[in-house]
Image: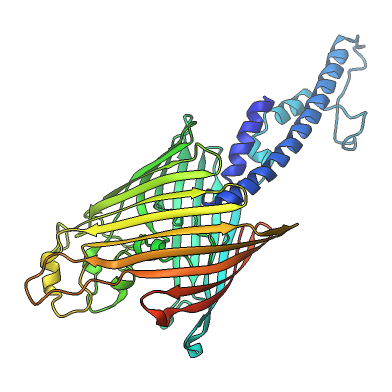
C-alpha cells in the first residue's frame, strides 16, 4: 500500500502544474531534488501513520478478546478527546477511511493556479530615440484534476499590456485541453494545445530560456508559441523515448497578405489560426520523437504537414501543402548547458497564387529555414542566486526560395541573416530571472541592440 501511494504521489506531483511539462531540464532537476526530499518526508509520515494504525488494531483486538459485561457495553468516541491524546481510540470505520484516502486528496487541492510573465527593455545601439519598454506578456494558467488520470489545462495570455481595438496588445487563449492517462502510460488529449516542435514551443517561460527575447529561429521559422486545435496521443517509454502524434487544424494560406512585410518576419506566423474560427477543410498531422536515455541528454525531432488551401472557393492554391520539421539536441553536463537546432519549412504549389501577387513585395516562399547553436555556463551560485552567462549564434532566412515565376515577375530571395546574442541570466530562487544581453546582426546592422528583462514563472 505504501509503495502504491508513493508512486501515485510522485506522478501527481509531477503533473500538478501545466507548466511542469514545459520546464527546462535544469529546472526539472531542481524540482526532482526537491520532490525527493518531500517523498522522504512522506515516507516518514506514512511510517508514523502505519505505526498508529498497528497500535489501534492491537487495541481493538484486545478489546474484542476481553470479556465485556452486558450491562456495561464499551462505547468508543473521538469527538470529546483532543487530537493525539493517548486515550483517544479511533473506531474501525475511521481507520478504514484513512487507509483508503486518495493520494490526490492527501497531497493537495485538485485545482492549481500557475502563471508566468515578462517585462523587457530594448535600446538600439545606433538610435536611442527608439528605446522602449514593454510588458511583453502575462499568462495565467489553471489546471484542474478531475481524478488521478484526468485533468484540464488552460492558459490565458495578455500581450503588450493593453488590449483594445486601437492598441497593439492581444488577449488570447494559449491552451485549453483535457488529457486522460491510461494504465500503460498512454496519454490522449483534445482541445487547443501546443505542437511539440523544437526546444522552445512547449518550454517557453522566461525562466526556461536564455536571453531577453526568444530566439529568432523558434519564432520566425517555428512560430512559437504555436498551438492548434485537435486530438493528440503521447507516451513515455522505459527506454527514455517519448513519442507524440496527432490530428489538428493547420494554417490558412488565404490569409497571406503580399502587400505586408509580415510574411517576411515569419511565414507561418502570418497565416496561423490559433483556434479562432479556424478553417478546417484541410487538417494536418504531426509527429515528434524525443529521447532522454542518457542523463542530461535530449535528442529529438518533429514534423508537421498538411494542405493549407482550406478548400477556399476560387483560391488559386487549393493544393498548397506545408511541411515543417526540425532536429534538436540539448546536453547539460555539470554546469554546462549546450543546445542546437535546425528547422526547415516548405510550401508547395504556390506558382499560380504568386502570379496574382505580381508587383507586391511579399509573395509566398517555397522554402524557409534556420538553425542555431548555444552554450551557457553556470558561473556562480550562492544560496538562491545563480549567474549563467551564455552565447548564441543563429542563422535564418524566411524567404530562402520561391517557386518558378514567368520572366520579369521574379522576386529576390531573402538574406541569410546571422545574429550573435551574448548575455547572462541571473536567477533568483526557482521562479524569478533577471536578464541582460547584446544582439549583433550580420546583415541588418540597424537592428543591433541592448536588452534587459525581468521574468517569473510558477
Q: Is residue 8 left or right of residue 238?
A: right
- Image quadrant holding the N terminus, namely top right
Q: Is residue 427 above or below residue 73?
A: below
Residue 412 appears in view: yes
- Image quadrant holding the C terminus, namely bottom right
Residue at the outermost front position: 442
Identify which residue, 21 or 346, lies in the foreground.
Answer: 346
Residue 165 appears in view: no
Q: Position of residue 408 (x, y in %)?
A: 8, 77
Instruction: Name the residue at 49% across, 31% down.
Output: 238
Identify which residue, 51 or 442, lies in the foreground.
Answer: 442
Instruction: Name the residue at 92% across, 29% down.
Output: 86
In the picture, residue 194 is in which quadrant? Answer: bottom left
Q: Is residue 369 above or below residue 49?
A: below
Q: Position of residue 382 (x, y in %)?
A: 74, 58
Count of numbered labels shown in the rendering: 0
Q: Position of residue 353 (x, y in %)?
A: 14, 68
Q: Is residue 383 left or right of residue 195?
A: right
Q: Position of residue 387 (x, y in %)?
A: 65, 62
Q: Is residue 272 left or right of residue 98?
A: left
Instruction: Name the residue at 7% across, 71% down.
Output: 406
Amino acid at each position: 500500500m505504501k509503495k502504491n501511494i508513493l508512486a501515485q504521489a510522485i506522478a501527481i506531483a509531477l503533473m500538478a502544474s501545466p507548466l511542469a511539462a514545459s520546464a527546462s531540464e535544469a529546472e526539472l532537476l531542481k524540482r526532482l531534488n526537491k520532490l525527493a526530499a518531500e517523498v522522504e518526508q512522506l515516507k516518514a509520515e506514512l511510517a508514523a501513520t502505519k505505526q498508529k494504525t498497528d497500535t489501534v488494531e492491537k487495541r481493538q483486538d484486545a478489546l474484542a478478546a476481553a470479556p465485556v459485561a452486558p450491562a456495561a457495553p464499551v462505547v468508543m468516541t473521538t469527538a470529546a478527546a483532543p487530537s493525539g491524546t493517548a486515550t483517544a481510540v479511533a473506531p474501525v470505520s475511521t481507520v478504514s477511511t484513512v487507509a483508503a484516502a486518495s493520494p490526490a486528496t492527501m497531497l493537495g487541492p485538485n485545482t492549481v493556479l500557475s502563471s508566468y510573465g515578462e517585462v523587457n527593455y530594448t535600446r538600439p545601439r545606433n538610435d536611442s530615440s527608439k528605446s522602449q519598454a514593454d510588458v511583453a506578456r502575462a499568462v495565467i494558467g489553471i489546471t484542474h484534476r478531475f481524478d488521478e488520470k484526468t485533468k484540464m489545462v488552460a492558459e490565458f495570455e495578455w500581450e503588450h499590456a493593453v488590449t483594445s481595438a486601437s492598441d497593439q496588445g492581444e488577449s488570447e487563449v494559449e491552451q485549453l485541453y483535457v488529457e486522460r492517462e491510461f494504465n500503460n502510460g498512454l496519454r490522449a488529449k483534445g482541445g487547443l494545445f501546443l505542437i511539440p516542435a523544437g526546444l522552445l514551443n512547449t518550454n517557453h517561460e522566461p525562466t526556461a530560456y536564455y536571453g531577453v527575447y526568444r530566439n529568432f529561429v523558434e519564432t520566425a521559422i517555428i512560430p512559437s508559441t504555436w498551438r492548434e486545435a485537435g486530438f493528440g496521443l503521447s507516451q513515455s517509454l522505459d527506454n527514455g523515448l517519448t513519442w507524440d502524434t496527432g490530428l489538428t487544424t493547420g494554417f490558412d494560406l488565404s490569409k497571406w497578405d503580399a502587400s505586408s512585410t509580415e510574411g517576411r518576419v515569419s511565414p507561418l506566423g502570418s497565416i496561423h489560426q490559433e483556434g479562432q474560427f479556424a478553417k478546417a477543410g484541410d487538417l494536418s498531422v504531426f509527429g515528434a520523437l524525443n529521447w532522454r536515455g542518457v542523463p542530461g541528454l535530449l535528442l529529438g525531432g518533429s514534423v508537421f504537414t498538411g494542405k493549407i488551401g482550406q478548400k477556399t472557393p476560387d483560391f488559386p492554391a487549393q493544393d498548397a501543402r506545408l511541411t515543417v520539421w526540425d532536429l534538436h539536441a540539448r546536453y547539460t553536463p555539470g554546469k554546462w548547458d549546450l543546445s542546437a537546432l535546425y528547422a526547415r519549412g516548405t510550401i508547395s504549389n504556390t506558382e499560380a497564387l504568386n502570379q496574382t501577387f505580381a508587383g507586391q513585395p511579399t509573395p509566398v516562399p517555397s522554402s524557409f529555414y534556420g538553425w542555431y547553436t548555444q552554450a551557457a555556463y553556470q558561473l556562480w551560485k550562492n544560496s538562491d542566486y545563480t549567474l549563467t552567462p551564455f552565447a548564441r549564434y543563429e542563422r535564418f532566412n524566411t524567404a530562402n526560395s520561391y517557386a518558378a515565376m514567368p520572366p520579369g515577375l521574379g522576386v529576390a530571395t531573402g538574406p541569410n541573416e546571422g545574429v550573435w546574442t551574448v548575455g547572462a541570466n541571473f536567477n533568483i530562487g526557482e521562479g524569478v530571472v533577471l536578464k541582460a544581453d547584446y544582439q549583433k546582426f550580420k546583415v541588418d546592422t540597424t537592428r543591433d541592440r541592448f536588452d534587459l528583462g525581468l521574468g517569473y514563472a510558477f
